[in-house]
C-alpha cells in the first residue's frame, strides 16, 4: 500500500500535477481580471437608461447567464481557431463577465439615489459622479458576491477539461488512468480536493480583507 | 467617452494576451532519429498549400500523447515519441529538409477533427481510423498501419471472450470508430451490449477500474498503453482499423503530398523499418 | 461556414429524438436534485441558526466543504471513487446526489440569511408562548422566511439546470451529453451545440426573469430591505 503511494509521489508525477495547477491558476487569474473589467463595463451600461447601451448589455448578460458553462466551453473550442486553453479561458471570461455585470448593477442600484442628486447639484457630470461618488460606494457592497463568484471561477476551471485542456482535474484523471488502485484513487482525489479547497479559502480571505479595508475608507 | 477608451484598450490587451499566450512549445528536440529519409531532396516546386506550411516555418501536427509506440508523451522524459511521431518528422523533413521543424499538439479522438477544421493543426497523425463517413469531413492518406478493436477487462471479472460481454456495458471513447464497429459485430453475433461514452481514455480506464464498465474497448494499440497487472486483454479482435493521415477537406494538395510520402515509404521498405523499430506487427 | 452546412442541420433534425431523451433526463435530474437541495438547505439552514453549537458547526462544515470544492470533483468522486468501497450508485443517482448536495450548500446560506432576516423578536415571542425551538421554526419563522427565500431559490434552480450538464462528463445521458455524443459520432458539432444552447436558453431565461421580478416584488414589499441572496 505504501509503495503505491510512493509511486504517486515520484517527482515526475508531482511535476505533472504542478503543471496542471499552473494552468488552473492561469485560467483563473485571466478570467477574474478580464471578467471584472468587462463586467463592470456591462453593469454600468445596463444601469444607464441609454436606449442602446442598456439593451446591448442586457442582451449580452441575459444571453450568457442562461447558458451552461460546459456548453459555452465546448462551443467556443469547436468554432474558434484558438488553442483549447485560450478558447476555454475566453468562454469563462465572457460567461463570468455577464454575472459580474449583474452584481455591479445590483451594487449600483443599492447606492442611494440621493447621492446622484447631491453630486449633480454640486456640478459633477454624470461620469464624474459615477467614478468618484457612486462606484466606490457600490464596490463595497459588491465585494461579497464578487468574492463568491471568483471562487466559483476557480472551481469552474475544472470544466475546461472536457475539451482536453490538462488543468488540475484533467491531470488528476490522467494519473488515475495510470494508477488505479483504491488507495491511489483516494490519494489523488483527496489531493485535488484539498488544493481547490485551499485556493478557494484563499480567495475568501482576500475578499474579507478587501471588505474590511473598504469599510475603513468609507466610514 | 473616456470610459469607452478604457474599454477599447482593455479589449485590445485581452486580445493580445490571448493570442500571445500561445507558443507553448511542444517538445521539438528529436529524441530519436527516424530511419534515414529515402527520398533525397525536397521537391523542387512544392504545391501551394505545402508552400504555405513551409513559409510558416513549422509543421503543426496533432498526435496522441497516451499511446505507447504510436504517439506517447512520457511525463518522465518530456518528449514525444512513437511511430506516428516519426512519420510527422519524416514529412517535415520532406518539406523543410529539417525534421525538427514540427510542433506537436496533443489530441484525443474527440478533438482531433475539430482541431484540423480550426486550422490549429495541419495534419492529424493520431491513430485515426479511415471510415467512409469520416471521408465526408476530411481527407485521408492511404493507410499506414492496420490495427484491430480489442478489449480490456478486469482480471477477476470472469469475462474471457467477446461473447461473455452479452448484456454487459462497454466503455468507449466519444468520436472513436469503436462503437459503430462493435454495434455491427454484436448484431452479427446476435449478442446485445450497452455502451458508455467518455471523452478521454483515462476516464474509460478509471471507469473500468471502478467497475462502471465491464470492458474498455478501443484499438488494441491504444489499449496496450493502459494494460496493467489488474486487467487482461481479451483474445478477440476484429474490425480492422486502418490508420490514415488526415487533412482538412480543402487541403487537397497537402493531402496528395502526404499520400505520396506514405506510398514512397511503403515501396522503399522504410515503413517496414519503422514497424520494426517500434516492435509493431 | 461549412461547420453549419445545411445537410448537417438535416441530420440533426432526423435524430431529434436523441436530444429529446436528453432533455427528459435533464429535467428529471434537475427536478429531483432541486428537491434534495431544498431539503438539505432547510435542514442545514435551520441548524446554522440553532442554539446548539454542534449543529452550527456541522452546518458550517458542510457549507465550507461543498462550496469550496468544484462540482466536477464531487461528482467524479461519487462516480469513480465510491465504487471502490462497493458503493455503486447508478449514474442518474450520482447526478441527483452530486447536484443536490452541491446546491444544498448554497440553499443553506440562503435559508440561513432568510431566517436571520426575520426579526429576532418573533422567535422570542414564540418561545415565550411555549413553542419549542423546532415548533417556533416550523410555524412562525420558516413561513415568513419562505417569502424571502423563494426568489433566490428560483435563481438556484436556474443554476442547477445549467449545472446538470455535468452529467455529460460521466456518460449521463442528459441533454448536453446527447449533443456531445451525437456530434462526436457524426462530426456535426455546429448545429448540435447551437440547438442545445437554444434549448437551455429557452428554459433558463424565462426562469431567470421570473426570479428577478419575484425578487423585486419581495424586496419592495419588505420596504426595500436587502433580500436573502
Image (cartoon, coloured by chain):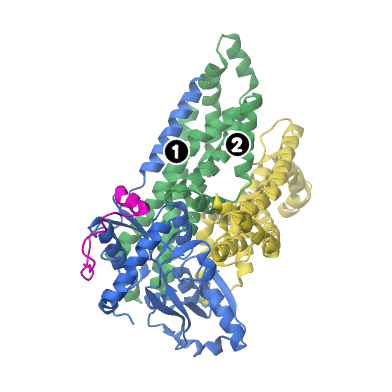
Q: Quadrant of residue B66?
A: bottom left
Q: Quadrant of residue B121?
A: bottom left
As drawn, the label of residue A33 is 1
Give C171 or C114, whichever is nearer the viewer. Answer: C171
Residue A45 screen position, x and y as percent = 59, 28
Magenta segment boundaries in residue numbering: B30-56
Residue C51 in view of the camera: no
Apparent colour of chain C: yellow
Q: Please identify the dominant SS of the magenta region.
A: loop
* Residue at (61, 25) in percent of width and height: A111
Q: Is residue B190 left or right of residue B171?
A: right
Tell me if residue B113 is in the magenta stretch. Answer: no
Tell me if residue B44 is in the magenta stretch. Answer: yes
**For the residue labelled by badge 1, is the local secondary structure a helix, a strand or a loop?**
helix
Apparent colour of chain A: green
* Total count of labels: 2
Residue A32 screen position, x and y as percent = 46, 41
**For the residue labelled by badge 2, is the local secondary structure a helix, a strand or a loop?**
helix
Residue at the disc numbered 2: A102
Residue B37 screen position, x and y as percent = 22, 67
Q: Chain of mark 1?
A: A
- In the image, residue A75 sits, relative to residue A181, either above or below, namely above
Looking at the image, which residue sits at the far front? B45
As drawn, the label of residue B254 is none
* Residue at (71, 43) in percent of width and height: C211
Give B187 or B242, whichever is nearer the viewer. Answer: B242
Would you say the residues marked 1 and 2 are in contact, meaning their CB atoms lie under 8 Å apart? no
Give the CA distance from mark 1 to mark 2.
Answer: 16 Å
- In the image, residue A112 sits, relative to residue B66, either above or below, namely above
Amino acid at each position: 500500500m505504501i509503495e503505491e503511494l510512493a509511486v504517486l509521489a515520484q517527482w515526475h508525477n508531482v511535476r505533472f500535477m504542478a503543471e496542471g495547477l499552473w494552468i488552473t491558476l492561469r485560467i483563473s487569474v485571466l478570467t477574474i481580471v478580464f471578467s471584472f473589467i468587462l463586467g463592470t463595463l456591462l453593469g454600468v451600461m445596463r444601469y444607464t437608461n441609454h436606449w442602446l447601451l442598456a439593451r446591448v448589455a442586457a442582451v449580452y448578460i441575459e444571453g450568457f447567464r442562461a447558458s451552461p458553462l460546459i456548453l459555452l466551453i465546448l462551443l467556443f473550442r469547436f468554432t474558434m481557431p484558438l488553442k483549447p486553453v485560450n478558447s476555454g479561458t475566453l468562454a469563462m471570461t465572457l460567461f463570468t463577465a455577464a454575472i459580474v455585470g449583474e452584481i455591479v448593477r445590483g451594487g449600483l442600484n443599492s447606492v442611494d439615489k440621493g447621492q446622484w442628486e447631491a453630486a449633480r447639484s454640486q456640478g459633477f457630470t454624470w461620469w464624474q459622479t459615477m467614478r468618484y461618488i457612486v462606484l466606490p460606494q457600490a464596490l463595497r457592497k459588491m465585494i461579497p458576491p464578487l468574492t463568491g463568484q471568483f471562487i466559483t471561477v476557480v472551481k469552474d476551471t475544472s470544466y475546461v477539461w472536457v475539451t482536453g485542456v490538462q488543468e488540475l482535474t484533467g491531470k488528476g484523471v490522467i494519473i488515475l488512468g495510470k494508477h488505479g488502485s483504491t488507495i491511489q484513487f483516494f490519494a489523488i482525489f483527496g489531493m485535488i480536493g484539498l488544493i481547490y479547497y485551499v485556493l478557494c479559502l484563499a480567495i475568501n480571505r482576500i475578499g474579507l480583507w478587501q471588505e474590511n479595508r473598504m469599510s475603513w475608507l468609507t466610514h | 467617452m473616456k470610459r469607452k477608451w478604457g474599454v477599447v484598450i482593455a479589449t485590445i490587451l485581452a486580445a493580445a494576451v490571448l493570442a500571445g499566450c500561445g507558443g507553448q512549445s511542444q517538445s521539438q528536440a528529436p529524441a530519436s532519429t527516424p530511419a534515414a529519409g529515402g527520398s533525397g531532396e525536397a521537391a523542387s516546386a512544392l504545391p501551394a498549400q505545402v508552400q504555405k506550411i513551409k513559409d510558416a516555418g513549422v509543421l503543426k501536427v496533432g498526435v496522441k500523447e497516451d499511446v505507447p509506440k504510436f504517439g506517447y508523451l512520457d511525463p518522465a522524459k518530456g518528449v514525444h515519441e512513437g511511430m506516428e511521431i516519426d512519420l510527422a518528422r519524416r514529412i517535415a523533413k520532406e518539406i523543410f529538409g529539417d525534421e525538427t521543424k514540427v510542433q506537436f499538439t496533443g489530441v484525443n479522438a474527440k478533438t482531433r477533427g475539430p482541431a484540423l477544421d480550426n486550422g490549429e493543426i495541419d495534419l492529424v497523425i493520431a491513430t485515426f481510423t479511415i471510415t467512409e463517413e469520416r471521408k465526408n469531413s476530411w481527407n485521408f492518406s492511404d493507410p499506414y498501419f492496420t490495427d484491430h478493436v480489442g478489449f480490456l477487462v478486469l482480471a477477476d471479472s470472469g469475462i474471457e471472450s467477446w461473447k461473455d460481454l452479452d448484456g454487459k456495458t462497454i466503455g468507449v471513447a466519444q468520436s472513436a470508430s469503436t462503437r459503430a464497429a462493435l454495434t455491427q459485430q454484436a448484431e452479427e453475433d446476435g449478442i446485445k451490449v450497452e455502451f458508455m461514452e467518455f471523452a478521454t481514455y483515462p476516464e474509460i480506464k478509471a471507469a473500468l477500474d471502478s467497475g462502471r464498465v465491464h470492458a474498455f474497448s478501443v484499438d488494441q494499440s491504444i489499449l496496450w498503453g493502459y494494460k496493467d497487472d489488474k486487467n487482461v486483454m481479451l483474445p478477440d479482435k476484429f474490425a480492422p482499423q486502418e490508420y490514415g493521415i488526415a487533412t482538412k477537406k480543402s487541403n487537397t494538395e497537402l493531402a496528395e503530398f502526404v499520400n505520396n510520402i506514405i506510398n514512397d515509404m511503403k515501396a522503399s521498405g522504410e515503413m517496414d523499418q519503422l514497424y520494426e523499430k517500434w516492435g509493431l506487427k | 461556414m461549412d461547420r453549419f452546412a445545411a445537410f448537417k442541420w438535416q441530420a440533426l433534425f432526423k435524430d431529434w429524438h436523441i436530444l429529446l431523451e436528453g432533455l427528459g433526463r435533464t429535467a428529471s435530474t434537475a427536478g429531483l436534485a432541486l428537491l434534495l437541495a431544498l431539503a438539505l438547505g432547510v435542514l442545514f439552514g435551520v441548524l446554522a441558526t440553532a442554539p446548539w453549537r454542534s449543529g452550527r458547526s456541522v452546518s458550517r462544515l458542510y457549507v465550507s466543504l461543498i462550496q469550496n470544492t468544484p462540482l466536477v470533483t464531487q461528482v467524479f468522486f461519487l462516480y469513480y471513487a465510491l465504487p471502490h468501497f462497493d458503493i455503486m450508485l447508478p449514474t442518474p443517482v450520482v447526478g441527483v446526489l452530486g447536484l443536490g448536495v452541491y446546491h444544498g450548500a448554497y440553499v443553506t446560506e440562503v435559508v440561513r440569511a432568510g431566517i436571520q432576516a426575520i426579526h429576532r423578536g418573533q422567535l422570542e415571542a414564540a418561545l415565550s408562548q411555549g413553542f419549542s425551538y423546532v415548533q417556533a421554526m416550523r410555524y412562525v419563522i420558516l413561513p415568513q422566511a419562505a417569502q424571502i427565500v423563494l426568489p433566490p431559490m428560483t435563481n438556484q434552480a436556474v443554476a442547477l439546470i445549467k449545472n446538470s450538464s455535468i452529467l455529460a462528463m460521466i456518460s449521463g445521458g442528459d441533454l448536453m451529453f446527447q449533443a456531445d455524443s451525437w456530434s462526436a459520432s457524426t462530426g456535426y458539432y455546429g448545429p448540435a451545440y447551437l440547438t442545445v444552447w437554444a434549448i437551455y436558453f429557452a428554459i433558463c431565461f424565462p426562469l431567470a426573469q421570473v426570479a428577478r421580478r419575484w425578487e423585486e416584488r419581495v424586496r419592495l414589499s419588505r420596504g426595500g430591505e436587502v433580500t436573502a441572496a
